[in-house]
Amino acid sequence: AQKITQTQPGMFVQEKEAVTLDCTYDTSDPSYGLFWYKQPSSGEMIFLIYQGSYDQQNATEGRYSLNFQKARKSANLVISASQLGDSAMYFCAMREVSSYDKVIFGPGTSLSVIP
Amino acid sequence: GAVVSQHPSRVICKSGTSVKIECRSLDFQATTMFWYRQFPKQSLMLMATSNEGSKATYEQGVEKDKFLINHASLTLSTLTVTSAHPEDSSFYICSQGGDSSVETQYFGPGTRLLVL
């Protein structure tokens, strides 16, 4: 069964606008972590932001913020003031303590920023 | 932050040959490292967990005799694709092992393998 779902295969956003990339997850582990990564065409995985299951506040890192809704098991990424360099694949990932801290990935969302 | 390197960055080989990919942790001791494979326009799929000083743990459906993993030291894990075939052509990427106390998970730059 798919543990991480990203329902948007592709997204477009106008430069300087904000965009939300969706991620829902499935776990029964009370202790887990959620990640977002950016993968440009070069292939490197760029760590963006992390949210722990016990964190009370939503994580923020510069223009990135994570809208964490634990009861709904969603962890959407919000990118504010989009830039052309934000065009890339974005992956949501989860790490579960009960799974020996393995990190598994969602299918990804391709984001294109339009000038 | 943790730095992970991979070598080579890309390799082209003939069908039937074996290819070794190295993953090094540059500023931390890694008792575990993860190996992923990514086909074009797909997500990263976890292949195996590399364990220092012991056998790797493979995910369901991954042939352990095909993808040999060695983790002989705390800074080096290697993945050998044995008797490579064109369907093994992919992007292979390693990452530092999981640690639930750490709020990051760093990846190597990846290795593009093309089997002719």
Image: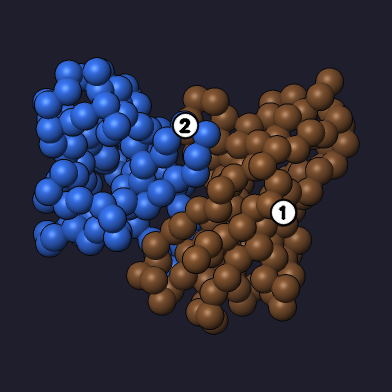
Label 2: chain? Answer: B
Determine which residue is flagged by label 2: B40
In this view, B100 is above or below A109: below
The location of residue B55, given as percent across then percent down, is 13, 60
Identify the chain drawn in brown.
A
Identify the chain drawn in blue.
B
- Whether labels 2 and 1 belong to a single chain: the reply is no
Q: Is mark 2 on a helix, strand or loop?
A: loop
From the viewer's perspective, tell me whether residue A36 is left or right of residue B65: right
For the residue pair A5 and B2, the one nearer the viewer reads as: A5
Q: Which residue is drawn at 17% across and 23% down?
A: B15
Question: What is the three-letter code of the residue carrying label 2?
Answer: Pro
Which disc number belongs to residue B64?
none
Q: Quadrant of residue B16?
A: top left
In this view, B81 is above or below B103: above
**Label 2 neighbourhood size at 10 Å, few (<14), some (14-19), many (20+)?**
few
Q: Which residue is drawn at 34% across and 57% down?
A: B97
For the residue pair B114 and B5, the one nearer the viewer reads as: B114
Q: Which residue is drawn at 39% across and 71% down?
A: A99
Q: Is mark 1 on a helix, strand or loop?
A: loop
- Screen quadrant of the C terminus of chain B: top left
| Residue B82 seen anywhere in this rendered image of the structure | yes
Q: In which quarter of the image is residue A87?
A: top right
For the residue pair B22 and B3, the one nearer the viewer reads as: B22
| Residue B78 seen anywhere in this rendered image of the structure | no
Image label count: 2
From the viewer's perspective, tell me whether residue B102 is left or right of residue B7: right
Question: What is the three-letter code of the residue carrying label 1?
Answer: Asp
